[in-house]
Amino acid sequence: MIDLFTPLTLGKTSLPNRILMAPLTRCRADADHVPTAMMAEYYAQRASAGLLIAEATMISEGNSAFWREPGIYSEAQINAWRSVTDAVHAKGGRIFLQIWHGGRACHPALNDGATPVAPSAIAIAIDDTVHTPEGKLPYAVPRALELSEIPSIVEAFRQAALNAIAAGFDGVEIHGANGYLLDQFLRSSSNQRSDHYGGTLENRARLMFEVIAAVTAAIGSERTGLRLSPLNSFNSMLDDDPIQLMQYLASELNRFELAYLHLMRADFAGIQQADVVSVTREHYQGTLIGNMGYSFDEACAAVASGQLDAVAFGSAYIANPDLVERFANQQPLAQPDAATFYTQDVKGYTDYPSLA
C-alpha cells in the first residue's frame, strides 16, 4: 500500500518520501533581499523532507511585500542561494524555489515609494496591515497594470526560473496562491479588468498560463510546479465560484505536464468552504500535492486512497526540523512560536532541536 513513506518521482526529481515542506515566508534575508547563512542552516536542518519548497522569492527588484524576503534577480542573490542548495544537497535533500510577485500586497514603504501594481486598482482591506521598517502600515491602493507591462512580468518569471536553476535548485514552484499577483488575476474579487486579462475564466487565467508556458519552455515542465489557493481569503481574496475555477484550471493544466500541482485546500479565515480537492483530483491527471491543516493520519489516508500523491506540511516544519523522523517513530511534535515567524534572527528559526 502507498503511504507517506513511499518514494515518489516529480518530473526528474526522485523523492524518498511524500512528506513535503510547504513554502514558509520567514524574512531572514538581508536588507538587499540576499539569502543569509542562517537560511542555509535552516533548510539543511530539514533536508529529510521528500521535497523542500523554499519560501516566496521576488522575481524582480521593486516588488517586496514582506520586510527582508529573499530575491532571485541579482548575482549576489543567486550566489547566496547556491550556498543554500549546496547545504541541502550535501544532506541528501531536494529543494524547489517558489518564485513570486506580490502584486497589490507590495507596499511603497518597502519599494522606495513605488505604487504597487495589480490587475485592477483595488486595495487589500484597509484593516489589514503590512510589516515595514516604519512599523505596521495599511496597504496602498495599487495601479492597474497596463497591457504593455504584462510581457515584462512574464519575462521576469522566466528569468527567475533560469536564475533558480543556476543557483542549484532542483526546480521552481510558481506562486499562484494567497492573494499575490497571479492569484489576483485569477479571482473575481480582485480582477475587474475589461480587456482580455479579465472577465471570463479564460481571460483571468491568461497571465498564469503565459507564465507557466514561459517557465516550462525555459527550464522544462518536469522542473516546474504550481501552487493554488482557490478558497483562501488571505489578502482580501474571494471568488464567485471556486469550484468552477478549479474545474477549469485543473483541466487546462494537464496540457503542461507539470512536476506537480500544489493545492491549498481551505481558507485560513473559513469564509469560503468547498471541496476543491475532490474536484481537482477528478479533473487533474498529474501529481497532486495537498496542503493546509493535514494531520499525519489524515495525510496517510489521503495518499493511501489516491486522492493525493503527497502532502506538504507548513507550520509543523517550523518547530520540527526532523518531521519525517518524528512521523516515522510516532513521536510528539514541538509547537512553533508564532512571535518569531517574521523576526530576523536565529531565535525561532534554527534553534528548534531535533529529537536525535
Image (spheres, rainbow, N blue to C red):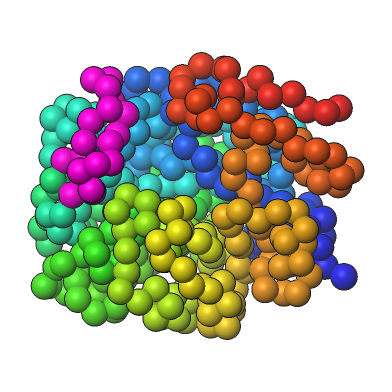
Is residue 35 or residue 274 the one in the foreground? 274
- Residue 124 located within the stretch drawn in magenta: yes
User: Residue 205's x, y, as percent?
Assistant: 31, 71
Which residue is depicted at the point 59% across and 23% down? Answer: 348
Is residue 262 or residue 127 the one in the foreground? 127
The segment highlighted magenta reads 123-140
Task: Establish if 258 lies above or below 281.
Answer: above
User: Residue 100's x, y, as percent?
Assistant: 37, 47
Q: In the figure, residue 239 lies in which quadrant? A: bottom left
| Lateral position of residue 113 relative to residue 228, left or right | left
Which residue is depicted at the point 23% across and 48% down? Answer: 125
User: Residue 224's x, y, as percent?
Assistant: 51, 58
Q: Tell me if residue 162 can be seen.
A: no
The quadrant the N terminus occupies is: bottom right
User: Residue 159's x, y, as percent?
Assistant: 36, 47
| Lateral position of residue 20 relative to residue 83, left or right | right
Q: Tell me if residue 265 can be seen.
A: yes
Which residue is depicted at the point 31% across and 58% down? Answer: 237
The quadrant the C terminus occupies is: top right
